[in-house]
Image (tube, rainbow, N blue to C red):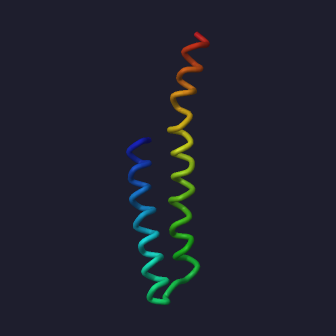
Amino acid sequence: MRQSHRWLSIVLTAAIIFNGIAVAVKKYTNWMGLMAVLPLFLLLFTGLYLFFLPYVAKWRRGRT
């Protein structure tokens, strides 16, 4: 999960750079903006999973 989160951050960075170039050249379209939103939502879910993972593990250890 951690590795996929890192790769998603690289994809998001590339999409943002691509969007910036498209805006500068005045060739921006709506699908280009959506291209950056998908990795952003995936990063949100993987980030939340990685954030809560230690808390869930600690909670499970305390129950047994």
Viewport quadrant of the C terminus:
top right
Q: Is residue 14 left or right of residue 64?
A: left
Residue placed most toward the observer, 4 or 59: 59
- Residue 17 screen position, x and y as percent: 42, 72
Viewport quadrant of the N terminus:
top left
Instruction: Count all numbered tags in the image, as a single digit.
Output: 0
- Residue 13 screen position, x and y as percent: 42, 64
Q: Is residue 4 left or right of residue 39?
A: left
Residue drawn at 49 percent across, 88 percent down: 27
User: As displayed, is residue 64 above or below residue 31?
Assistant: above
Residue drawn at 46 percent across, 77 percent down: 20
Residue drawn at 39 percent across, 59 percent down: 10
Q: Quadrant of residue 9?
A: bottom left
Which residue in the rendered view is the most extreme toward the top?
Answer: 64
User: As displayed, is residue 46 above or below residue 8?
Assistant: above
User: As displayed, is residue 33 above or below residue 51?
Assistant: below
- Residue 63 screen position, x and y as percent: 61, 13
Residue placed most toward the observer, 41 or 23: 23
Residue drawn at 47 percent across, 76 percent down: 19
- Residue 4 screen position, x and y as percent: 41, 48
